[in-house]
Structure formats: structure tokens, C-alpha cells
Amino acid sequence: MKISFPYMGTSHIVISYLLEQLGHEVIYPPVPSKRTLSLGVQYSPEFACLPFKILMGTYLEAVEKGADTILTSGGCGPCRAGFYGELHKRILRDLGYNVDIIILEPPLVSPLDFFRQAHRLIKKRGWINLARVFRIAWRKLEALDALESTLHKIRPLALCKKQVTQVYEDGLELIRQANSVKEVDEAREEALANLRQVPADHDFTPLRVGLIGEIYVVLEPFANHDIEKLLGDMGVYVHRSIFLMGWTQNNVIIHGEEGERDIRSAAIPYLNQLVGGHGQNSVGEVVRYAEKGFDGVIQLAPFTCIPEIVAKSIMPAVSHDKGIPVLTLFLDEQTGQAGIITRLEAFLDLLKQKRMKRQEVS
Amino acid sequence: MQAYLGIDVGSVSTNFVVIDEDCNILAKLYLRTRGQPIQVVQDGMRQIEEAIKGRNVEICGVGTTGSARTLTGVIVGADTVKNEITAHAVAASQLVPDVQTVLEIGGQDSKIILLRDGIVVDFAMNTVCAAGTGSFLDHQAARLNIPIEEFGSLALQSKNPVRIAGRCSVFAESDMIHKQQMGHTAPDIIAGLCDALVRNYLNNVGKGKEILPPIVFQGGVAANVGIRAAFEKALGVEVIVPEYFDVMGAIGAALLAKSAVKGKNQTDFRGFAISDMHYQASSFECKGCPNLCEIVNISVDGEVLARWGGRCGKWETIRKTG
């Protein structure tokens, strides 16, 4: 099985490790680029959202590189992403590619289907082998999340932003190479220590901004104009609402882990039901960020994303009640960064003024 | 006399303003960008120099704004390079001190800015669609063979505005043509268009925003009395169009320059001589990765002043940002 999968943030480090340890040949698709986007747009329904198009392009590039199987996630509920794997498969078949798509549905929703699909990946080396490598993969996931959240803290303070990027990328490589629980732990410590040693102005108090919205555009830098880096380079501490591990926990292991339940309950006064995707979470997260004293929140959404449109229409009420500014950015094919930068700069000016005023009062 | 220069280089117009310490307008200039930002900035500098000649005016600070703010900042040597949302808000609150809402419609952007007690508390800017902005009005005026200056006053003559679809400029144009072919008069169609654009603006950028008076309407489109009347009808309150509505971004940039030089006591202004220098913009495609970024070089007399356009930052070592 020559297997490939789409990029989403740093998840490829763990997914490729798991697949290799399960005995498969991994075909790395190129990192999403303008070419990926052009291919994706060309072969996708015009009304599909940006994640669909980037994935479509990625699959086409993976097939070009020789992949015969693609691993992706399914989904359920009112967001159409649940159907994307199926649709991608049909488009690839129509284009004449004899490629198989393994769609992992949330195991808690459709356990039998999940088991059947997962078994296709696992049978080669057996379930006992899985138990061993899964422990290591999980440790890697934890390490990646720890490294990223430290990066978010260090980047706004770092004196040389280029250096912090380099040290972080070296850290990712250390974690990628680790091959046992012990090695992962060592790689994690080394990567974190290196990041903490980057020369930084620790007296600087950055603006604190929460990043919320649809999971793919929040996690994948290509889809969001590298917004975490843009903000970090402008001296802003970005707290991302979604990390790989939290998401995996909620969807693969236990339904409704504590943090998730808390976010949903925070949303209830404004939105008392699931609206698909991360719509309800987005509302709840704004409430929690306000309570934690964040300066503002940025909501990222693919253009035409219904769950985030619902959330956006509720934002003015939440923002007003809780006194926290919210900026919504809809993302689509545009690769020009200027428009995003203008809005971010204006939003940061607003947050700075607000903070200054609060300090004057107190 | 100490003075400050503000330059707003937008998609359609490029505006220059010189203000004194008390924000009196000493000179003002409105030019069309015509897709040539460097040339229009040099032209404008020449005209501004002419306008303030012999009046004992010394430029002590320069600010740039608008979509070509970074480029312009490099060319003139700006003390501050600021986004147009902040610049517009600063200008509005200077000229109408208790302003709570700014409606701004320019060539390709429309924005709404909410201020409370003189500070910006919320804003929105059109994202994926430019329906209802100046470029579209220009296009419709040209199609109907009506000078853009008369477009708005024609709308005021209408007794029965027709309904036009406003959420997309393509829909709006086809709706206008259908109604015109049915025999509706130009004033009724134009008035219907003004209503449609205002409806779209309030429902799109203005969605969910608390629009409180005093309301200031600025940007090039504020010249259109039809749109202003449609705003007043829709909002039920008076809409103020300030005297210098068409150069508010530049006024904001000048005010920001004034506060920027306060801190450092000197200016980076390269002087009016820049209008005679030979600026060159060249570009190439970086082949370092499949992104194929389009990198732009700005050079003066062969020396590279600035370079930008890449995603990874490897080319942008000498980029100046504000």
C-alpha cells in the first residue's frame, strides 16, 4: 500500500510515523502551495469550501507521486465536510485515477465502520504492534502541542523572529526522528529548552489574542496566510483554541472530554445546540477567552462555511456582553496577504487603544 | 511653520494633505492612481511642493496609508505607515470629535468603524466582494453615459425608485439593465441602485453593528448625494459628510505622522527631490518552492530600496514596515 494523507498543521509528523510503523510506504504530498490550490480549484465544485479544494489539490499531487491509497477523516453532523472524502474519491475516479480512499469515521459515532477501515491499515503487522506504536505516536502528539504552545509564547518576545522559526523547525525535526517513548521525551525536552533559550525581551507584555474557528483553516498555515506567525511577528501572543491532541481526544477516544464540555456549556446562553463543525465551540471559546482576560479574538472561517456563519452572526452579542472585540476573517482562494495584514493591523490598533484606556482608568 | 504631510494611495485615488500643528488644511490634492502608484506619488509631490512654495512651510513628518502605503512609505521616507482603517478613524474623530460611527466607501473597499469616547471599538471591512464601491458606481455611470458628479443628484429626482438586487455587482447590473429595458427612467433606476447599495452595505459590513449618531460618511463615494440620502433614509438620522470627505485617509496619515515624530524628534522624509528621482519596480518569480512567489524590487538609481512579496521571508531582508 502506497499511502498518502493531507497536511493539517504538524499532524503529518504523527500520521506518517504511525503509517510507517504499521508497515506501509508513505508518499508525502508536497506541502500545499499555489499549485495545490490551482489544481484543487480546477477539479472541485465551485461552491465547495477552501479546505475541500486544498485537499483535492493535495490528493492529485499525491497521486502524481505514486500514491494508491489516501487516508482521510470523515465526520458527521450538519457540516458537509463529513461527505468530503466520498466526494473526493468520486472526483479522483472520474479523472481516471484508480485510487482508494480510506475514510476514518469518528469511532464513537460509527464504531463498526471505523474498525473495518482501521483494520485495513493495521492487519499487516497486527493489533499488538499498533498498541506499541500508538503509545509513541501519542507522546509525539503531546510533544508537538507542547512545542507549539511554547512557540506561541516565545515568538512575540523573540528579538529575532527568523531565529525562533528556525529553532522551532529544528525542534519539529527532533520529534519526528524520535523512535521510542524515551526518545520522544528527550526530543521534547531538548526542543523546548532550545526554544526557551532564544534571546527574547521577557519584560515585554504582548497583546493576547485567541484564535478560533473552523479546524482546518485554524490549523493549516497555508489556508490561513500563516496567521499565527504573522501575529507573533507583530508581537502578539496567540492562543490557539484547537490543538491536535484535544481534537483527537474528542473525536477518537472519549466523546466530550472535559474541556470540550466546558466550551459547549459556555456557549449555551447564546447557542444551545450543535450547528455542525466548530460553530458552537467558536461561540463558547469567545466567552472563555473574555473570562480569561484576553484582549481580543480572531475567528477564521472558510468562505461559505455555514457553522462559522452561524457563529459569526452571534458574535456581536457575545462581544458586547463580555466586552471582547472579535475580528472575523473569511478565507478563500486569495493568496494576496495585503488585505489580511490591513485588517490585522487595524484590529491590533483597536486592541492597543482599548488596553491603554483600561490602564488609564485603573 | 511646522507642517505634516499625509499620503493615501488607494486603488482608485491618491490623496495628499498638508496640515499645520492645529490640523488646519494647508494644501490638499486628489489624483487618480491609474494603476501607477509610484508615478502618481511623484506627480503629487511635485504639485504639493508647488502649492506650499513661498509660504514658509516646513514638512516635519510624513505618514502614508492606503493599499500602497508600504510602497509609498519607502519612496517618500515615511515616519509612519498605517492601515487605512486606523487612519480614517483618526481623521474622523479629529474633525467631528464626538463621532460614534464612520461609514467609509472608497474605490474598492467599504468599511464601517465604530468609535466610543474617541477610540475605535469595532470595525468591519468588505472581504470577498466589492459590490457597491466607487469602482462599480463609476462603471455604471459610464454605462449610462452620465458624468459621475451628476449621478447622485439624479437619484434625488426620483419619485418611484425601482428595486435593484444589491448583494453582487453582477446581479445589480443585470437587474438595472432588465429594468431599463422595461422602460423605467434613469433617475428611478439610479435611486433604486443607491437604496440597494446602502441595503447591501448595512447588511454586509454593517451586519450586527450598533450604528449610533453622530454618523460621519467619508471616502470618495460620500460625494454621491444619492447614496447619502439613501443612508439617511435607511438609518433615520442625519449623516454628516465632512468638508474634506474625499481626503480623510490622508488627513489621518498626517495626524499620525505628527504624533510619530513627537517621539523621535526628527523625520525620515526624503524631501521633495524624490519627485525627480528615478524609481524602478521590477519583479521576478522565486523558484525556491512550488509557491512561486512574485517578488518585487523597488530601486532608486540602481540601488535596491525594498523588496517584498514572498511568503517565507527570505527575500524581505530590507523591508520596511509600520
Image (cartoon, helix red, strand yellow):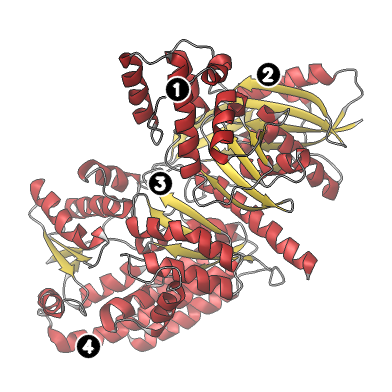
Q: Nearer the viewer, residue B45 or A329?
A: A329
Tell me if mark 1 has few (under 14), some (14-19) or many (20+) residues whose alpha carbon lies within 10 angstroms of its own.
few
User: Of the residues shown, which amino acid type is indicated by label 2?
Assistant: Asp
User: Of the residues shown, which amino acid type is indicated by label 3?
Assistant: Gly
User: In this rendering, does residue B24 appear at all?
Assistant: yes
The Cα atoms of the two marked residues, 4 and 3, are separated by 41 Å
Where does label 2 land, which residue?
B43
The Cα atoms of the two marked residues, 1 and 3, are separated by 60 Å
Q: Position of residue B58 (x, y in %)?
A: 88, 29
Tell me if mark 2 has few (under 14), some (14-19) or many (20+) residues whose alpha carbon lies within 10 angstroms of its own.
some
Residue placed furthest toward the front: B159
**Element on which disc 4 rests:** helix
Q: Does A2 sit above or below residue B33? A: below
Tell me if mark 3 has few (under 14), some (14-19) or many (20+) residues whose alpha carbon lies within 10 angstroms of its own.
few
User: Going by the image, does A35 lie left or right of B142?
Assistant: left
Do discs 2 and 3 share a chain?
yes
- Give the mark, 1 or 2, whose residue is nearer the N terminus: 2
User: Of the residues shown, which amino acid type is indicated by label 4?
Assistant: Ala
Q: Do the residues labelled 4 and 2 touch (CB within 8 Å)?
A: no
Q: Does B48 sit above or below residue B295? A: above
Q: Mark 3 lies on which chain?
A: B
- Give the mark, 2 or 3, whose residue is nearer the N terminus: 2
Looking at the rendered image, the disc whose residue lies closer to the viewer, 1 or 3, is 1
Tell me if mark 4 has few (under 14), some (14-19) or many (20+) residues whose alpha carbon lies within 10 angstroms of its own.
few
Where does label 3 land, which residue?
B288
Q: Which chain carries label 2?
A: B
Where does label 1 land, which residue?
B160
Q: Which residue is drawn at 46% across and 44% down?
A: B203
Residue placed furthest toward the top: B145
Where does label 4 land, which residue?
A131
